[in-house]
Amino acid sequence: MKPTDIDNIMTVWLTANLEAHPFIDSKYWYQNVSAVRNAILQAEVYCFVDNLDQVNGFIGLQGSYIAGLFVTKHYRSQHIGTTLLNIAKEKHQVLTINVYMKNQAAINFYCHNGFNITKHSDIEAEMTWSKIK
């Protein structure tokens, strides 16, 4: 991530969250923009940038925790999320993420990429991947 990418990253973050989580009041995402922006500036972030130098996907890590993985609608289903996830897998022995149980597409994506549900409630699932099997 370049410092100049933050505005594009925040647009991707907000748009993707609104699209993926219709079961959460949109006010929640708008209220958290500032906090997430600050967290992203402190995180380990890898971006997918198109040929116009626009960020269209990113993964943000806080240690081995995936704080977010988002790809714009236009670029979904083109293995960009998997590519970003593989970058994180190369750099970490273990990765975890929390996913909303109602976001079945995300659960399926992470299961397809070697993650297992390690804890869950009615609202959220913790999913873990480990290089060591």
Image: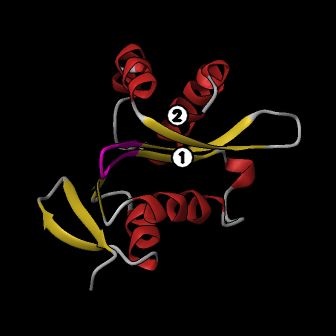
Disc 2 and disc 1 in contact, CB within 8 angstroms: yes
Q: Classify residue 92 as left or right of residue 84.
A: left
Taking depth in this image into account, of 77 and 80 the one nearest to the observer is 80
Q: Which residue is mark 2?
A: 13
Instruction: Locate residue 34, reporting x and y percent.
Output: 40, 13
Taking depth in this image into account, of 119 and 131 the one nearest to the observer is 131
The residue carrying pointer 1 sits among few (fewer than 14), some (14 to 19) or many (20 or more) residues within 10 Å by Cα, namely many
The residue drawn where x is 16% and y is 70% is 118
Q: From what the image shows, is residue 35 above or below residue 9?
A: above
Q: How far apart are labels 2 and 1 at the CA level?
A: 6 Å
Q: Which residues are magenta?
A: 61-67
Q: Amino acid at mark 1?
A: Phe
Label 1's element? strand
As drawn, the label of residue 70 is 1
Q: Classify residue 42 as left or right of residue 124.
A: right
Quadrant in the picture for the N terminus: top right
Residue 54: quadrant of the picture:
top right
Whichever of labels 2 and 1 marks the residue nearer the N terminus, that label is 2
Q: Amino acid at mark 2?
A: Trp
Label 2's element? helix
Instruction: Locate residue 85, reporting x and y percent.
Output: 50, 61
Q: Classify residue 130 as left or right of residue 112.
A: left
Q: From what the image shows, is residue 87 above or below residue 59?
A: below
